[in-house]
Image (spheres, rainbow, N blue to C red):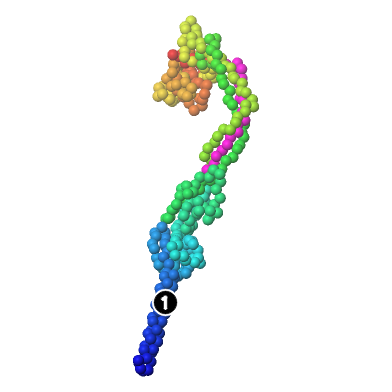
Amino acid sequence: MDKSAAECTTTDNFFNGRVAAALLAIILLVVAIISAYQGAKKEVNLLVDGKQRRVHTFHNDVQGLLQENGIVLAAKDRVSPDPATALDDGMTVNVRRAVSVKLQVGNEQYQVLSSAETVGEVLNEEGVVLGERDIVTPALGTRFDKEVCIQVDRITTRVIEEEVPIPYEIKRENDATLFRGIVRVIKSGSEGLEKRIWEIVYKNDKEMEKRLLASTMLQEPVDQVVRVGTMQTVTRGGNDIRFSRAYDMVATAYTYTGNNTASGISPHVGVVAVDPSVIPMGSRLYVEGYGYGRAMDKGSAIKGNRIDVFMESHSQATSWGRRSVKVYLLE
């Protein structure tokens, strides 16, 4: 081989080596760029109000991811993890929008914005401290993602003592020597006294329940003893008078006034004015010292055990005047 041919071969080899080295460098650079690209690209699970989607990003922190996806945080919105947190491939970023929450705590009502996930978290955020017996509706663990009303009923208790009078009983004894309707007290009764301890349960300051915890009798009641008349027949003027009830009354005589009686008839001997709440109108009566009569009149001044008996003349009425009498309600 001549000298010129040898020089040409050497030059070609040198050129080919440099080209190969350049190509290798380019390939390595491309691989490095691709590796860097793949390393910088992250796949993230983005959860917004419970709706999940997979996104890809080159941002290094949560804040950048949110901005890239057009997510603007309003007051009380919550993002987890914190916006300054570095992003990792496969990470989940949770954005929870704040919703309106109506709070009824005892007798107070107000409205707040909250991004809490459960009822219990809302109460913690608002500094609501629950008592042992307080009732929360809905339950503390209830989750929500839209407007909700939370009610906290304050349950409190109070223990009180009171002294209560205990009524006495009335024991009745029949007495055939007394007219029917007549009652005589033989032994007076007296009330007893009992101490009672109550637990009162209040719901939002209003009494809801009252429970008796204990009771102690401080003084026993004393029974009253009465005798009740059972006699239903008396003899007057040789005639037996059978009656259903007898009354001790005050009778006043009256005579013509120019007016008819309350029952609409003209007054005459035998007409008796009564209190209808004691003696029913129209009842047949026997008034001692006066005789038979009928309840046919009434008046505003006649109340209780009082009657008026009609007399034919003013002198007879004056003679009778006012006196205590026995009045029999005839059967």
The answer to whether residue 325 is seen in the rendering is no
* Front-most of residues 120 and 149: 120
Indicate the position of residue 34 as horizontal and vertical percent values.
40, 73
Which segment is the magenta one?
184-204
* Front-most of residues 294 and 143: 143
Which secondary structure type mostly characterizes the magenta part of the structure? strand
Left or right, 122 with reference to 7: right
Give the crowd class for mark 1: few <14, some 14-19, many >=20 residues within 10 Å.
few
> Up-down: is 208 above or below 128?
above
Name the quadrant of the C terminus.
top left
Residue under the image location 53 percent in, 10 percent down = 176
Q: Amino acid at mark 1?
A: Leu
Residue at mark 1: 28
Indicate the position of residue 223 as horizontal and vertical percent values.
59, 20
Name the quadrant of the N terminus.
bottom left
Residue under the image location 56 percent in, 17 percent down = 171
> Up-down: is 302 above or below 90?
above
Residue under the image location 51 percent in, 14 percent down = 180
> Up-down: is 86 above or below 15?
above
> Up-down: is 295 above or below 237?
below
Residue under the image location 50 percent in, 48 percent down = 152
- Looking at the image, the residue that sits furthest to the right is 218
Indicate the position of residue 141 as horizontal and vertical percent values.
47, 49
Q: Secondary structure at mark 1?
A: helix
Question: In which image quadrant can residue 132 be found?
Answer: top right
* Front-most of residues 220 and 92: 92
Indicate the position of residue 103 as horizontal and vertical percent values.
49, 52
- Looking at the image, the residue that sits furthest to the front is 1
- Confirm whether the magenta stretch covers residue 187: yes
- Confirm whether the magenta stretch covers residue 260: no
